[in-house]
């Protein structure tokens, strides 16, 4: 149901990547027993967040919990469209942090989230493996025979894939390269496909690319080639801990969090 941002297949969910159907599945037996006995006064806040946010949010976890000892953060990382569907189907979540406005707007229209606010921006980049492939000079180069496989997220569920399709369509090559495309379940899987050489190129966020030493950034896609890449966040209407969820959301909009996000390459709108 969730893959995280490129975690190994088959690995058991960690505190950062727990199954949304079981709020305690990521906890140790001792922690769960403590809660059952009423000895643990912490409130668990589950954040359903876009895969591209994994590194930054994992970094922020310790900083936040160090100053907010009454709250325990747990994460459910996946493609924004997948998370949207989970929330629609009633899976537990306290906060939704999306990599696209479309998914947030859909939940807002159904009154499944509170008021949202755009917290971050990102950029789309074309990447190739560090070794063994020519660097394309532009998106149109992907139509050349040397590029046989191109990875991008599934446009229906992965915002990065949606932006990539828009850029390729505006560039006039979507129909030409469609037979070469390998669709991925989230943006981190796109990165993995390119890192391992399973595809010749891929379209990912700048923040994902800058953390890898196994790829090269061929170019940054012009902003006017796709919709703005915006990251809105909102409290989920069905949260059982609304005040604590609002507290976490306020922190994510604060100066300490902004500095961490910027360290990972995100832009502040």
Image: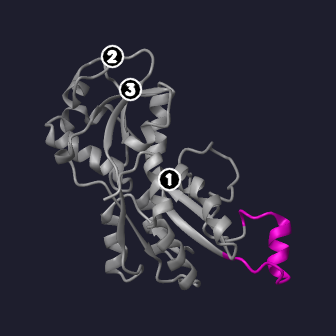
Q: Position of residue 151 (x, y in %)?
A: 38, 36
Residue 185 in view, yes or no: no
Highlighted magenta segment, given as a residue range: 25-43
Residue designated by label 2: 134
* Left or right of 40, for residue 122: left
Task: Give the SS element for disc 2.
Answer: loop
Please say whether residue 26 is one of the residues in the magenta stretch: yes
Report which quarter residue 170 is drawn in: top left
Q: Position of residue 6 (x, y in %)?
A: 55, 44
Q: Residues within 10 Å of mark 1 (few under 14, many from 20)?
A: some
Q: Position of residue 44 (x, y in %)?
A: 66, 74
Earlier residue among tags 1 and 3: 3
Residue designated by label 1: 260
- CA gap, disc 2 and disc 1: 34 Å
Residue in the image at 16% along x and 47% along y: 224
Residue 197 in view, yes or no: yes
Q: Nearer the viewer, residue 176 or 53?
A: 53
Residue in the image at 51% along x and 69% along y: 251
- Which quarter of the image is occupied by the N terminus? bottom right
State yes or no: discs 2 and 3 in contact (Cβ < 8 Å).
yes
């Amino acid at each position: 149901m969730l893959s995280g941002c490129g975690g190994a297949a088959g690995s058991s969910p960690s505190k950062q990547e727990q199954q949304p159907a079981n709020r305690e599945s990521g906890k140790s037996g001792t922690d769960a027993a403590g809660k059952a006995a009423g000895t643990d006064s912490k409130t668990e806040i589950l954040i359903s967040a876009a895969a591209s946010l994994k590194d930054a949010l994992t970094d922020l976890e310790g900083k936040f919990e160090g100053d907010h000892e009454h709250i325990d953060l747990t994460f459910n990382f996946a493609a924004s469209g997948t998370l949207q569907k989970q929330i629609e189907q009633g899976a537990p979540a306290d906060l939704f942090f999306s990599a696209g406005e479309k998914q947030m707007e859909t939940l807002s229209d159904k009154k499944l989230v509170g008021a949202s606010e755009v917290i971050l921006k990102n950029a789309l980049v074309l990447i190739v493996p560090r070794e063994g492939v020519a660097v394309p000079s532009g998106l149109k180069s992907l139509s050349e025979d040397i590029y046989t496989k191109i990875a991008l997220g599934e446009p229906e569920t992965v915002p990065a894939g949606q932006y990539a399709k828009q850029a390729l369509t505006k560039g006039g090559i979507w129909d030409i390269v469609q037979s070469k495309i390998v669709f991925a379940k989230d943006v981190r899987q796109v990165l993995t496909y390119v890192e391992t050489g399973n595809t010749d190129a891929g379209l990912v966020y700048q923040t994902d690319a800058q953390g890898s030493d196994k790829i090269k950034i061929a170019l940054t896609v012009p902003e006017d080639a796709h919709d703005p890449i915006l990251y809105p966040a909102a409290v989920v209407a069905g949260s059982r801990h609304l005040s604590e969820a609002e507290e976490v959301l306020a922190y994510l909009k604060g100066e300490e969090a902004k500095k961490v996000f910027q360290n990972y390459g995100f832009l502040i709108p």
